[in-house]
Amino acid sequence: NAGVTQTPKFQVLKTGQSMTLQCAQDMNHEYMSWYRQDPGMGLRLIHYSVGAGITDQGEVPNGYNVSRSTTEDFPLRLLSAAPSQTSVYFCASKRGFGQGDEQYFGPGTRLTVT
Amino acid sequence: GQNIDQPTEMTATEGAIVQINCTYQTSGFNGLFWYQQHAGEAPTFLSYNVLDGLEEKGRFSSFLSRSKGYSYLLLKELQMKDSASYLCAVLNNAGNMLTFGGGTRLMVKP
């Protein structure tokens, strides 16, 4: 199994540009999520999905959209990039909602907005 | 709301024991996770506690006191490769949101 994969690994955008960060998992996990990680602030939840066709907002959803058309894929869209969105983005998945279900993280996408 | 606190940085010596504390105040609780994150890499799962007490897994142990809103991660026989950030995270009642603390950066010195 490849686990959780993310593309691209690095991206530089200009303010106002849009782009999609890709995330896929091959573990047949129901739950997928997107986090951003900024220095000193830990990981913050952007959006999550509990299954195909179902998404919900996390702690910091503004400026981001998601969709979940298949179990495997959970792309994150930046509609109009801003310098405040410069961060490292991690996608994660877990089997379900049982106690102790650990999240598996992808390798991350390092995004810089100039 | 959720509030999770950890020390920002700690330093310890190779071969020693170190304890990383985490305190939390959350509106719901369905377990506490510890993750390890090496610089430039993704977090990886270390431990999960939902009941009070100590969970031991090799050199790593994790403790939870729900009444005190307190957990710690204990690392024994420290190795240089243990230099990393350690993230404490609390799962909400519904099991659909994990809230992380800011992480503790541990530096292990020879």
Image: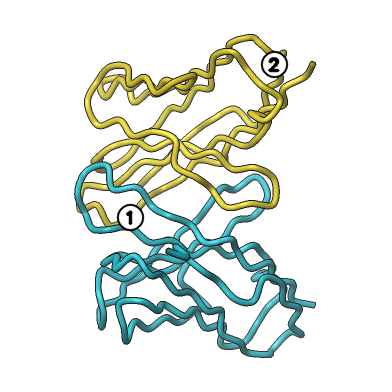
Chain colours: A cyan, B yellow
Mark 2: which amino acid?
Ala
Instruction: Please determine whether, in this image, residue A51 is positioned above or below residue B72.
Output: below
Displayed quadrant of residue B15: top right
Does dot 2 land on a helix, a strand or a loop? strand
At 38% across and 52% down in the image, what residue appears? A103
Height in image: A75 above or below B61? below
Tell me the subunit letter for badge 1: B
Q: Residue furthest top?
A: B16
The residue that label 2 is drawn on is B12
Q: Which chain does the residue under circle 2 lie in? A: B
Mark 1 / mark 2, whichever is N-terminal: 2
Identify which residue is drawn at 71% across, 25% down: B80
Kindly report the distance in space between the C-alpha atoms of the residues bearing marks 1 and 2: 32 Å
Q: Nearer the viewer, residue A68 or B8?
A: A68
Question: Residue A82 location in percent, x, y?
Answer: 68, 78
In front: B28, or A28? A28
Q: In the structure shown, which secondary structural element does the residue marked by tag 1 occupy? A: loop
Q: Quadrant of residue A96?
A: bottom left
Q: Where does label 1 land, which residue?
A: B97
Say if mark 1 contacts mark 2, CB within 8 Å: no
Residue type of the residue flagged with mark 1: Met
Residue plotted at (49% across, 78% down):
A76
Label 1 Cα neighbours within 10 Å, binned few <14 / some 14-19 / many ≥20: many
**Location of residue B23 in the rendering, given as x and y in whole percent from the top left corner:** 43, 27
Density class for disc 2 (Cα within 10 Å; few <14, some 14-19, many ≥20) is: some
Is B95 on the left-hand or right-hand side of B89? left
Determine whether, in the image, residue A7 is placed left or right of residue A101: right
Q: Position of residue A79 (x, y in %)?
A: 56, 87
Left or right of A47: which side holds B96? left
Q: Quadrant of the N terminus of chain A?
A: bottom left
Using the image, determine if residue B60 lies above or below residue A38: above
